[in-house]
Amino acid sequence: MAETTVVIATRDRADELARTLGRLRELDVPVIVVDNGSADGTVARVRRDFPWVRTVALDRNVGASARNRGVRLARTPYVAFSDDDSWWAPDALRRAERLFERYPRLGLVAGRVVVEPEGRMDPVCRQMASSPLGRAADLPGPSVLGFVCCASIVRREPFLRVGGFNPVLFFPGEERLFSWDLTAAGWACCYVDDVTAHHHPSASRGPSPARRRAELRNDLLTTWLRRPLRVALAETATLAGRGLADRDAMAALGAAVLRLPAVARRRRRLPAEVERLVGLVC
């Protein structure tokens, strides 16, 4: 019986999703697709061509927090995330399951990302492998406070207890805040090089001014949500200073200000030890 469910959040990328589901079919594990209000027929196509997939159709785009819905529906102790343009190596999920069984404090496995079609390792993996947080004796790899979501596997219950991905952030950069919250709850996030996910970046996704603005906005919001006031104020001042010559930075600051009421409702200081660890990597 499968112990891991794969959860995918998608929007308007039916072709890439079909390729991913074709790959995941070979793993013989439950798959839940949460559609963020697609207008390209994604839901109908998945239900027609992949009837073994559980498909959830949302009436609007809720960003990364759509994954929370999929995790709530899962009935396995572990959940692996894929994007509509990524999939897991044949042995990856079973390897992760064995690690969770062996290391009781392990809450999240951050796997190695192989970028296709070149077959090269994503540079972020080298950063995680050399994490300044080091490796504890009771963990299978270096501790990290950030990860690539499409190459991550979590324990379901801790994920739900800490609230999953925060809806204030929408997308992208939701991983960092979640890793802070999971660590604050007493769980560890580790990079494990021999748990592999393949990522074939969608042709419709790439660097853009809108994505850069969203990244800058979410970096600031993440700080406001969890870090000391002095740190949040300093980061705000830095972004405002950049905005004098950088339109994206100014737009990001304005977008962050609009979300401050939601941040105020959800702000929660990290424990001192976790704040110390965050300070080592930020």
Image (cartoon, rainbow, N blue to C red):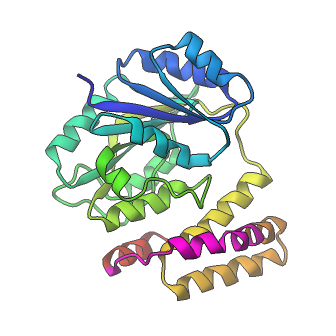
Quick check: is 70 in the magenta stretch? no
Quick check: is 266 in the magenta stretch? yes
Q: Is residue 150 above or below residue 160?
A: above
Q: Is residue 241 above or below residue 111?
A: below
Image location (x, y in percent) of residue 110: 38, 46
Instruction: Identify which residue, 247 or 57, lies in the foreground.
Output: 57
Answer whether residue 87 is visible to the viewer in this image. Answer: no
Instruction: Identify which residue, 45 or 83, lies in the foreground.
Output: 45
Residue at the location (41% across, 59% down)? Answer: 179
Q: Is 162 on the left-hand or right-hand side of 243?
A: left
Q: Is residue 241 above or below residue 64?
A: below
Answer whether residue 219 is visible to the viewer in this image. Answer: yes
Magenta stretch, overall SS: helix
Image location (x, y in percent) of residue 38: 69, 32
Question: How many numbered callouts?
Answer: 0
Instruction: Identify which residue, 158 or 265, lies in the foreground.
Output: 265
Image location (x, y in percent) of residue 104: 17, 51
Residue at the location (54% across, 43% down)? Answer: 66
Residue at the location (67% across, 42% down)? Answer: 60
Image location (x, y in percent) of residue 214: 69, 58
Instruction: Identify which residue, 128 or 273, lies in the foreground.
Output: 273
Which range of residues does the magenta coloring cover?
253-272
